[in-house]
Image: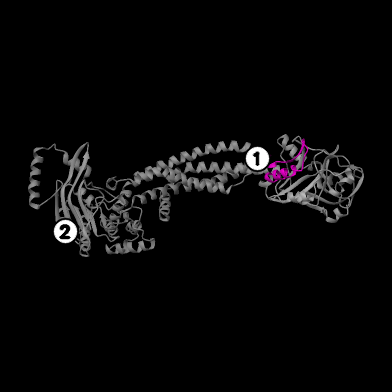
Amino acid sequence: MLLELKHIYKNYLQDKIVIPVLKDVNISIDEGEYVAIMGPSGSGKTTLMNIIGCLDRPTKGEFLLEGESIVNYNENRLSDLRLNTLGFVFQSFNLLPKQTSLDNVALPLSYAGVPVKKRKEIAFQALKRVGLAERVHFRPSQLSGGQQQRVAIARALVNNPKIILADEPTGALDSRSGIQVMNLFQQLNEEGVTIIMITHDANIANHAKKVLHIFDGEIVEDKERKEKQQAEVQSEKEAKNDTVFSEIEQDFGVKEWEGEI
Amino acid sequence: MLENIRLSFQGVWSHRLRSFLTMLGIIIGIAAIIAIVSTIKGTNEQIKKNLIGSGTNTTTVQLTEEGNYPAEMEYGIPKGIPVLDDDMRQQLADIDHVKDASLYVSRTQVDYIYYNDTSLSGGQLIGADSHYLGTCGYIMKRGRGFTDSDYEKYRKVAVIDSVAADSLFGDANPVGKTIDIKGEPFIVIGVIEESTAFSPVINSVEDYYTYVYNDGSASGIVVIPDVDWNIVQQYDEPQNAKLLADSTDNMTSVGKAAQTLLNETVTSKSIKYRAANMNETAEESQQVSATTNKQLIWIASISLLVGGIGVMNIMLVSVTERTREIGLKKAIGARKNRILAQFLTEAAVLTSLGGIIGTITGIALAEIIGKISNVPIAISIPAVILAIAFSTVIGVVFGLLPAVKAANLDPIVALRHE
């Protein structure tokens, strides 16, 4: 098993009130899988993503990565996991605007201590892999959204990670570019890279071989989810001034970013 | 590290105006300090040169009455002071940092030296051993110095300085002419002069004595072999000593050592050997200008402090501006220390650059001040290195807070920052 979450809980403290965001989440993902985590805004999917991405720690529970428990890792060891084992793809690309595609892709290599000359070579290969070999010296502002996201994917790939974590990777793209990016993920998965994707879009989630639904901080079965969703709609009608969700959304939910850094 | 420096330069260049304004405090502070230090050093060297005489590191140890005035032998030799022999001269020459030593007897204010009817009034007569001219650093302008055979054969020959030559002979060549010292004929064999032009600055009574008694060059010098001294003065006299030190800085210590050595032979209570302390006199004068200027340096340091705070401020702004960049870098695997190093390097590059520009400005400023107010300028290389190093330190010190702030950013929060 490449990745195992056992009884993961995550609470946030807001104004002295404990808000449970994840409740007893159990996930196991094998090497080479293509998993989509779906859920509406405020369901806790971004928090789950942050925990899987070693950016955040669970309040309670066990997290095994490649069979090793990482909940007690110190900050530097978590940084190294993010550097070598995980690759991140963000909704808003997060490319450095003043640097070329090549330099953006080479950035993680500098943290891995790869010599400068070798970095360019490896970064070029990664860009070639995402089909942008001829855009090497372009800056993000000279690229289309789809191309920018492909540069970001190349950056995530450059240290040969076991897992690529994608947070709404098509959220900022038009449908055509979105399809291109999804095809790229498909191709990478066929090449053996484990992909975990977060989305609220069912069409996107359908690209994955396995879809996990998260609702109200819990991983739920399909049937159960529909029932819950209906109950939710019902209760929302009953209590329109219930603001808990929107508050959570504000603080922990995905925000739409426009442009770049 | 090198990469961080390269990236920092790119950062500075991409915000040229902002970087320059940030550096301005450092530039002004460093420029002021460099300009002040350069003028202090220039003034000090001028004082030293004036008082001691550039090039000739000769110091005098002479018999002194009551610790103040040179002992005059005019009215008989005081008791308790022996006449020294060449062994003692050799001992003096063996003192550390002494290149040569000479024993001599002298009379100041003599009025018994004539050429025909012309008198050399107020001049100095010196009976010197064969080391004297070399030890004093004289150069021969005309003729020759003393030879061993002059001493062996008790030749009545004299070497005069250019001041004496002027007043006795005018424009004529003195070499080969005969002068009259207390009725004895001496043949002038050479004319000497100081190795460099000597223009004393006399600020105090001490300075005056330093010149008139130690040097006596004001009204001319006539030097004869010490073996001829009792032909003129009837008896041998206890001598004074001249020592040639290997550097200007060693003149005082050499003088003191010789003073101790010579006083071991003296039993007189009132008359002792005393080293003329020219460096001390020079240092006293230097001190006056140094204290005023040290206060100026303190004021300039305030500018550096303000500059440092400016750098801290702009670095904090930069950290806020680049929160997302920092968040991204941490998310994709940059360790805390990498972020810390990146921002520290940026601050240090900024202030070092300010330090370098400030140094150049300061040197230019010093040159301009020197030209306008006719103050001598000396650029001190250690001060320049220190100034640039110090500006780097300012960057590290004032960059620390922003860098720590950047390194401690939570990547989740930072990535969501707008």
Read off the residue under disc 2: A208
How many numbered discs sit on the rendered protein? 2
Q: Nearer the viewer, mark 2 or mark 1?
A: 1
- Asked if marks 2 and 1 fall on the same chain, the answer is no
Tell me the quarter of the picture where residue A84 sits: bottom left
Residue A212 seen by the camera? yes
Whether tag 2 and tag 1 are in contact, CB under 8 A, the answer is no
The chain letter under disc 1 is B
Residue at 71 percent across and 43 percent down: it is: B260
Q: Quadrant of residue A190?
A: bottom left
Tell me, for residue A47, which label it has, or none: none
Q: Is residue B24 magenta?
A: no
Residue B237: image location, x then y, percent = 83, 43
The quarter of the image holding the C terminus of chain B is: top left
Mark 1: few/some/many CA within 10 Å (<14, 14-19, 20+): some
- Magenta-colored stretch includes residue B255: yes
Pinpoint residue B125: horizontal percent, then vertical percent.
84, 44
Q: Residue at x 58, y 38 (%)?
A: B293
Callout 2: few (<14), some (14-19), or many (20+) C-alpha neighbours within 10 Å? many
Q: Which mark is residue B283?
A: 1
Query: Which corner quadrant holds the N terminus of chain B?
Result: bottom left
Residue at screen point 78% across, 47% down: B103
The magenta segment is B252-281
Q: What colour-coding does the image apply?
A: one colour
Amino acid at circle 1: Glu
Residue A169 seen in this snapshot: no
Residue A258 or residue B60, whichever sits in front = B60
Which amino acid does the dot numbered 2 rest on?
A: Ala
User: Tag 2, which chain?
Assistant: A
Is A28 on the left or on the right of B364, as rendered? Answer: left
* Residue B41 x, y percent position in the rendering: 61, 43
Q: Nearer the viewer, residue A75 or B411?
A: A75
